[in-house]
Image (spheres, coloured by chain):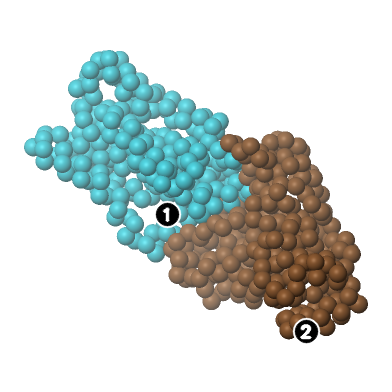
Chain colours: A brown, B cyan
Amino acid sequence: MVKVYHKSKTPALKKVSLTVNRGQIFTLLGRNGAGKTTFLRVAATQLLPSDGKVEVLGSDVVSEAAKIRKKIAVVPQEGNTIGPLTPWDHVYLTLLARGMTRADARDRTRKVLDQLEMTSYQSKPADTLSGGLRQRIRVAMAVATDAELLFLDEPTLGLDAISRRRIWSVLKDICREGRTILLTTHYIDEAEILSDNVAVINSGTLVTSGSPKELLSKVDERVRVDVTGDRFTEDDLARYGRPVRIAERWRVLTDNKRAGELTIEAVRRNCDVSVSPVSLEDLFVDLVGGEEENATMSGDEK
Amino acid sequence: MSVYHTLRSSVVIGYMLSIAWVRRNLLSLVWLFATPFSILFLITVTSGGHAFVQATIGTILFVLATVGTGLAGDATWYRLEVKLQDLFVASPVSQMGYLLGIALNGLFFATPALVILLPVLVYLGLPLIDLPLVMLAVCAVWLFSATIGYIVSTYVTNLRNGWQSGLLLSVIVAVIPPAFYPAEILPPNILPIAYLMPTTHASLILRSFIGQTPELAYWSPAFGWTMLGVSLVVALLVMLRLARWRQP
């Protein structure tokens, strides 16, 4: 898939090629502006591709969009709720507009509001609810449908840790029903916990893809050591492993033995130090650049 | 998508954006009264009451045209802020269903004005039996305006331009054509241009129902109805061809 926006010289997507299997949660991971939303919007038939072929559920997104649209639902990025409408109105009326019977729409609305722990707010106007609850309404509008494929563009943006976990649990349930989810996020912990497969996109290019386990196996090192402070130079740290600067700290990817040596040295120099196994976040930083603090923050840290 | 599903989704979307909204925000019904009734008041007072019939017709058409062209702003808001268009593009709802839905929402907000003004027209001489035809004519203006407003909204890239486009369109559709004033005062070389606008024909049709059949070159009620239908069909075809349901 290639996408070049009008009046833009730089392609938003440069020949990105991906396959998403049915019944999976597939996550597009990347920094802001990497091209995740563009990919998702093309696949969800909201945006025309500039070149290439994209098939969704066996149909072409350009010539057979109507066929695809019967089987999909989306949570658009950073949308809003409709002022005085309640969570119940949002979900129930969306289902009716999609063609569901009133009885089915009622059942599904009740179920999804319960799953997302919103029953006690279901009759309150959306504009009196918190941002997190409004985001949950938007997720509920897609999750409640009977769509085979859900496109979720940063569905947990701005949610607290507990709400995020609640949504993860609902998404896992959907997946167990055999439905497919394509989601974008820049929360790396979310991608690691939720996904069957992950693709990392950077500057419109597919950097890597695979299951979180496969991706982790691409990192040679097994341990990361975080050292805070300025008492080490990059050259000092390079003797212990591969250093990456993240905001006020250094992260060194290394093996168990050298992690022990670095920890002792850091304590000797009176630095704060922590040791943990490498994660998808380390791979991500490795792939898209270590200078950017925003891109590496997990949702909980944020 | 079948005609039934298109109509069903449009009624639901219309309900979602109007009745469900008004149930909790009753004041929003009042705003729409302000401008058209101000114009009615001004024309009536400055004409010493002589232009009340024409001003009433103009006000009815202005209300319907304004809720239609207002979609240039409203639909931009739904698309850019609420992401409602994105939500429905990636769903079984068709573009026509969506357009009719957001247009019905506007029609709902025009209802209070119509409830006041249509009985006034009856009082001024409109036979009750002709009321359905009058409603058909004004609804054609409403749908034409809504279609134009929606087409424009799909090209607008920021909200402020959306609202401003809506205001400009309402002037073009409802103020400049002879809705608030008699078409007879237009110079003969301007009249054919006025005939291009459905508001002109709706106004003349309404006048002829009240017994004030205009005496204009080339105009007859049959011509007026034909032009109303043609302009609506053309607007809908242009919408299907040019409106950006899916963004390029």
What residue type is disc 2 on?
A: Val
* Rendering quarter of residue B207: top left
Q: Residues within 10 Å of mark 2 (few under 14, many from 20)?
A: few
User: Decide: marks 2, 1 in contact (CB < 8 A)?
Assistant: no
| Identity of the residue drawn at 83% across and 67% down | A238
Farthest residue to the right: give it.
A257
Classify the position of the C terminus of chain A by image quarter.
bottom right
Where does label 2 land, which residue? A267
Chain of the residue under label 1:
B
Against A287, residue A116 (above or below) is below
Which label number is shown at residue B18? Answer: 1
Chain of the residue under label 2:
A
Q: Position of residue B220 (x, y in %)?
A: 30, 20
Q: Is residue A145 left or right of residue B14?
A: right
Which residue is more in the foreground, A180 or A271?
A271
Q: Residue B11, can we see it?
A: no
What residue type is disc 1 on?
A: Ser
Q: Position of residue B82 (x, y in %)?
A: 51, 54
Q: Position of residue B186 (x, y in %)?
A: 22, 21
Q: Secondary structure at mark 1?
A: loop
Q: Is residue B76 left or right of residue A184?
A: left
